[in-house]
Image (cartoon, grey):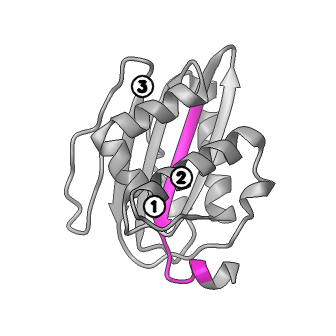
Amino acid sequence: MRIGAKRRLLAAAALGLGVVAAAGVHQATRAAGCLPQASLAPPESWLASQINQTRTQHGVAPLLVDSRLESVARSWVVQMADSGRVSHNPNLENQAPSDWEYLGENVGSGPSLQAINDAFVASADHYANIVDRNYNAMAVAAVNVNGVVYAVEDFEYSPSAADQCA
């Protein structure tokens, strides 16, 4: 599911390997604090690299990692894993950094992070979040519970994101 500038809804996708959903939101301004990708846990760093690789392959600028949004993604992936269900963060708009303008979210579960990433890229709605030119920052989180991997990709546009990382 994505919500654009006029808050219109597009269909969410469910994929056979697990449950995967995409959402996007546009609202008032929100900002980013920069987190070096190298400071992420290895699975999260890998996922962030995959997102940026997909973006650059399609002529879209890579995303910064927003440390404040990262804490939101990490909290939500733990919530999903604890419940054993994949769902969008219903409070993302309120938990994201205060000066965001656009938000989007991909959530999923599956047997591996590679399988989830492949599913995101193969799904039109999820792929749209990954390559959306409106975003300039992201956060990723992943956990493995008893062989089931849960993943969250949060995306945002913040006018101050580049200034935070300069």
Neighbour tally class for label 1: few under 14, some 14-19, many 20 plus, Cα within 10 Å: some
Under mark 2, the amino acid is Gln
Q: Is residue 74 visible?
A: yes
Is the Cβ of the residue at disc 3 closer than 8 Å to that at disc 2? Answer: no
Tell me what residue is drawn at x 51 percent, y 25 percent. 115
Quarter of the image holding residue 63? bottom right
154 to 30, vertically: above or below: above
Q: Position of residue 141 (x, y in %)?
A: 64, 43
Residue position for label 2: 53
Q: Is residue 90 left or right of residue 124?
A: right
- Cα separation between marks 1 and 2: 27 Å
The reply to whether residue 80 is visible in this rendering is: no
Q: Is residue 10 left or right of residue 152?
A: left
Quadrant the N terminus occupies? top left
Task: Quickly name the residue at label 3.
Answer: 19
Q: Looking at the figure, which quarter contains the C terminus? A: bottom right
Q: Residues within 10 Å of mark 3 (few under 14, many from 20)?
A: some
- Decide whether the magenta segment is chiefly helix, strand or loop: strand
Q: Where is residue 58 drawn, in percent x and y? A: 39, 57
What separation in Å lies between label 1 and label 3 (alpha carbons)?
A: 22 Å
Which residue is more in the foreground, 113 or 68?
Answer: 113
Q: Secondary structure at mark 3?
A: loop
Going from N to C along the chain, the mark reached first, 1 or 3, is 3
Which residue is at the front of the view, 78 or 126? 126
- Residue depicted at x 63% and y 65%: 66
Q: Earlier in the sequence, mark 1 or mark 2?
A: 2
Q: Quadrant of residue 138?
A: bottom right
